[in-house]
Amino acid sequence: MRKDESKLFHNVDRWTIFIYILLVFMGWLNIYAAVYNEEHSNILDMSQKYGKQLLWIGGAAFLAVLILIIDAGFYTVFAYVFYGFLLLACIAVPFIGRPIKGSKSWFGFGGFGVQPAEFMKFATNLALAKFLSNVNLGDWKTSNFRLKLSSIIRNYKNVLITCAIIFIPALVIKQLQDETGLAIVFVAFIVVMFREGLSINFILIGFLAVALMVMALLLNNLYVFIGIAGVAVLWFLFSRKKVRNIVIICICTLASFALVWGTDYIYDHLEDHQKIRIDSYLGRSRADLKGVDFNVNQSKIAIGSGGFTGKGYLKGTQTKYNFVPEQDTDFIFCTVGEEWGFLGSAFVILLQLSLMIRLLFLSERQRSPFSRIYGYGVASILFFHLTVNIGMTIGMMPVIGIPLPFFSYGGSSLWSFTILLFIFIKLDSQRLLILR
């Protein structure tokens, strides 16, 4: 370290911070474009969303500096404390929070609201890194699936605790706050488990489970059951007739039957608007362009109208005249597509991906397992948000209502992403230390 160099930025990765600042600045400009009002054209007007977003950006800058000041060991020592405190906040908010747009998942402070579920992501990442850095998951890497299964059985406590750390917050957010989108985000942490040794076979099992769930919704369950039974018979005929194999075949068959039945049962108990959305996405019903499909249809029109180079900044007609609902939050990307076109959209996506690739590179150079695991968690969360948000604006993903990182309007999302990212930047700055 040079004598004239500030200790605050000692060993801090400046490229990551530069990409972060560029994304936040571009997001602010797009929020201004999405809700542009000629009567309030001053971008610093605090009565408008773009003015309020500037306050959130100032708060995010303060949090970033505060995180860099604090020693990296603080985040390992208090990892479980953050997790427990924010989990309690998520449980309490439906009872003492303030309803916003029909969702009682916010704490109100004057004219502002804070959503604890957003901050639960960084807390879960800390707790997951803390736990996984202190257990050995190497047995999951054995080459034989039978050995992998037996290893998991021997380490069932580690598996159960890991899954509990990830899915308890998701369950609380879904059941108590009815925030399906935020709850699904926690699935991204599964990527961290694969990096730490979870067998690739479980990805295959996951895809097969999803395929069965889709078939259960598209086909008569009787046909699905017959298909499962047929596969089980073929598996039995072409396998060695050992007791172990027969037991595995029976367990897999019964689990498949239960998954199909459970999918049908859950679907029957969904609310009507959720059923309509699923039916529309799977093609079970005609597109309702004036109803459930209105948002996505208007978003695709806006993005498509931008063409290759876009209509120009503040010249988007679809967004300017409010044809696209939630165009400053969940559907902010349609503003990018309409005004900046394909070139601008590609630049935004590449910039987001460059941040994630940078995070993976930094994660792999960590000496501390805690820092590496946390870094992969950050990259996984950002990638999940990017993929699903853009996917739903172009009709490739179901609309579940999650923000585009650093772009969507809102203090909770911006602050949570900032905390999530800058904790890792701080950990990386002290990468020569072994943190536990």
Image: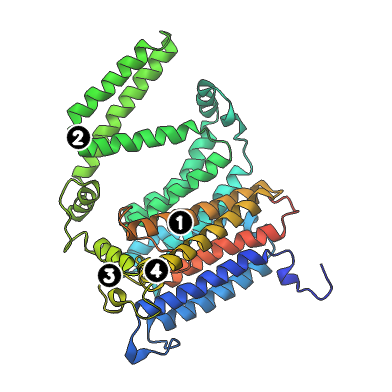
Q: Is residue 318 above or below residue 242?
A: below
Q: Position of residue 365 (x, y in %)?
A: 69, 50
Q: Nearer the viewer, mark 2 or mark 1?
A: 2
Q: Earlier in the sequence, mark 4 or mark 3?
A: 3
Q: Amino acid at mark 4?
A: Gly
Q: Nearer the viewer, mark 1 or mark 4?
A: 4
Q: Earlier in the sequence, mark 3 or mark 1?
A: 1
User: On residue 219, which mark appears?
Assistant: 2
Q: Amino acid at mark 1?
A: Leu
Q: Which residue is mark 3?
A: 325
How many numbered badges does the structure rendering display?
4
Q: Secondary structure at mark 4?
A: helix
User: In front: 427, or 106?
Assistant: 427
Q: Which residue is mark 4?
A: 341
User: In front: 35, or 274?
Assistant: 35
Q: Which residue is mark 1?
A: 87
What is the CA distance from the residue labelled 3 to the residue labelled 1? 31 Å
Mark 2–mark 1 CB contact (< 8 Å): no
Mark 1–mark 4 CB contact (< 8 Å): no
Residue 252 lies in what quarter of the image? top left
Q: Earlier in the sequence, mark 3 or mark 2?
A: 2
Q: Residue placed farthest to the bottom in the image?
A: 39
Q: Residue at x 42, y 10 (%)?
A: 243
Q: Earlier in the sequence, mark 4 or mark 2?
A: 2
Q: Residue at x 17, y 33 (%)?
A: 220
Q: Position of residue 368 (x, y in %)?
A: 69, 48
